[in-house]
Image: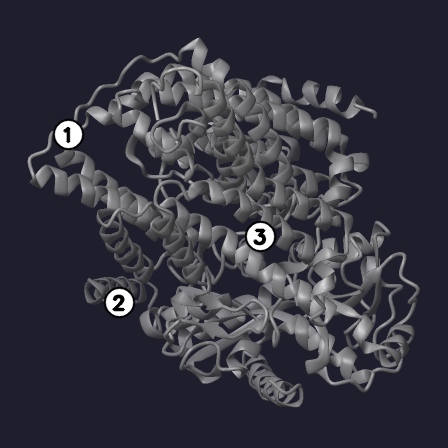
Amino acid sequence: MNLDYLWHGFAVALTGQNLLVGLIGCFIGTLVGALPAIGPINGIALLLPIAYTMGLPAESTMILLSAIYCGAEYGGRISSILLNVPGDAGAVMTALDGYPMARQGRAGEALTLSGISSFVGGILGSIGLALFAPVLARLAIGFGPAEYFVLMVFAFATLGSMVGSQPVKTLIGCTLGLMLATVGLDATSGAYRFTFNQPELGDGIEFVVLVIGLFSISEALVILEHQGRGFTVIRELGRMTVRAADVARCTGTMLRSSVIGFVVGVLPGTGASVSSAIAYTTEKRLSDTEDTFGKGDVRGLAAPEAANNATACGAFVPMLTLGIPGSGTTAVMLGALMLYNIQPGPMLLTERPEIVGGLVASLFIGNFLLLLLNLPLVNIFARVLTVPNWLLVPGILVLSIVGVYSTHASVFAIFLMLGIGMAGWLLRKAGFDMAPIILGFVLGHVMEINLRNALAISGGELSILFSSAICIVLWFMAAAVAVLPTMLSWRSRRLKVARTAGMPAIDG
Amino acid sequence: MIRFLTKMVAGAALVAMAAGGAALAQPAKPECLAGAKPGGGFDLTCRLAANALLVTKQISQPMAVTYMEGGVGAVAYNHVIAKRPKDGNLITAASSGSALLIAQGKFGQYDENAVRWLGALGADYGVLVVNADSPYKTLKDLVDAYKADPSSFAIAGGGAVGSQDWMKASLLAKAAGQEPKQMHYAALEGGGAVLTALEGGHVQVGSGDAAEMVKHHVAGKIRILAVMAPQRLTGALADVPTAHEQGFDIDWPIWRGYYVGKDVSDADFDWWVKAFEAASKTPEFAKEREERGLFEFTMVGKPFEERVKADVVRFKQLAKEAGM
């Protein structure tokens, strides 16, 4: 394959102006990523008109926008880890192990390690984009509604690993998520479901509103409750660097999760929220032998961070090769190209190689800049934890409310978020995890739409779900993921029993 | 809280009105509300007005574009009616899709008379597309094949049953003498998803808009069989025949326009009408419109209001015929 465009792209991206633009983009991206509710799409929508009026050339604008996009995937982890408040959609899973780490006084470690995971995911994703984009574009086209449905079956099969110690509560949580996903306009029939004549509910419950409610508002309530009962939280920051042994333990996780994240990113129908969920649950299935995931396991932190950064790169594949947006953010970037009178589409690489090459090269450079920007700042970020509760709780509430209002311009969304937060707090008191709710919501939505579209295409024939090679491979993967770990643990238990048979039992 | 905010908004509107109260003065703070996320059709519509009015010097300061997503414009519609009915600074983007939703009662309790329809500045046209490898070269080929075996055709569109894309597909079904409700119709998320489904061979026919399909047609990935326009389109689609030329009475223009609140003063309304009329006559405007992939369709003031009302009546009739 001819990589000339890429070398040319590095020449474009390494000019002084474009390096500066990339650095600014990385910084702004980290910022919008760290703020709850405000994600890369808002950052890009905000800066695009400014870049355009400033007369930046098209390739500089694309470099700026892609730097913001990647920066946001880095930034999202910060508030997830420190406050249990996901900064953006891809960082929800990061909170599951990142926040417990911070509470154990390992905030600095968690931030550094997740920064490295982000970097690995970002770099591997960029390499994948540079090398395999045209091949993968053909794979993405092979995914029709039936294939997406089976992909979601696979995702739910990996989800089995979340069941853990309280299967009933996990299933109830997941069902709650599925139910919440049915609110709003039914994409197939056009009917409104459970909207109670509120136009604000017409598009369903926004992911951001649900996440901010379930995580930040309920977290603020939990902190307040502990405060009221006289708990004092120990605010240890811990070391600011990461143990080499931890990085070594995570290497496999990072590599696997980057691949998962990249492939899911390439598929136009799915984004960082889906990929980080699949990466996390897959990793839990594969490597959580001591049941430490969810309690501050470094691998549970590395998986979603590597995945969401790789997804950001993967989403460029359909955009650059097919002219089809792979995510909401790339949709806005396509619009940006059109503003410059550049028709994005299958001909983009041949017609404007400097734009495609510059963008891909800037992803490589951007990831290095982001790593350099993020590691020294860990110390500063981590100090958020030393903020006293009387300042922290109102801070979380204000950030959440401002964030939701600024993206929806709707008072209704604020009340909905607060209501969901109250419900989330009660559920947490009853011992429920928030993650299954989110997973049910994200995956259920994609699953329902695609099942119904697949059946609409076939006229109700179920055979369409087994008709293509991709479907069959995915069915086998789903079955393997569901069955293998049980078999493996059964085998290892038998081996253990066989081994300990001759000696005095030390543990049960 | 809500009441307080309402008062604040109303107060701000009053202040703004006082500032821009003089007859035919330009609005102090021109604003265009897009009832969706950044990057969609409403955003494009707003940016057309904002840029065109600025480059033609109808407004001296840039027009702000604000977003309020929800219900494909329903939230913005209700917001303008309930909260900002008198705000002469504000125009809100709409399209023939809005008229369709109003006709189907999906904009809440309000009908088309709850706002003042200001004008349209451009249009797009419905198209039916097939994969470039498809054996069907003309609309007639497709209709004949569909007539012979309707169950072997899966049609994809970027909207639910009852949406514009579904309506266009139903016109095909009707032309083939088939029941629209029996169509194998997949409701995908937007035109991009329709293209991928076509290229991947998951569906055989795509229903969409000319502007989003044209570059893929030119690149040879798909074939546009017919444009649903009264006459041939200009530019890259000049060689694609209309449905009328091919003997089918199928028409589907998608105008992109604006409305203002019901109680906006006649003076403010007339200022906007004059500004639109003046701007739309300039070559700068034509350039702005073409950059956004829109075709010529300027209709301002009274004729536009009549057009919207006629559309709502027509869509009600179509929905009934399609068995909605």
Judge by depth and name the residue closer to the eye, B161 or A148. A148
Judge by depth and name the residue closer to the eye, A103 or A131. A103
**Count of labels shown?**
3
Say what secondary structure mark 2 lies in: helix
Q: Mark 1 points at which residue?
A: A388
Say what secondary structure mark 3 lies in: helix
Give the vertical position of A271 relative to B240 (above or below). above
Q: Residue B55 carries which label?
A: 3
How far apart, in angstroms, are the residues tagged by discs 3 and 2?
Answer: 31 Å
Say what secondary structure mark 1 lies in: loop
State which chain disc 2 sits on: B
How far apart, in angstroms, are the residues tagged by discs 1 and 3?
Answer: 52 Å
Nearest-to-viewer mark from 1 and 3: 1
Type of amino acid at the residue the image marks with label 1: Pro
Q: Would residue B250 be visible to someone looking at this image?
A: yes
Q: Quadrant of residue A255?
A: top right
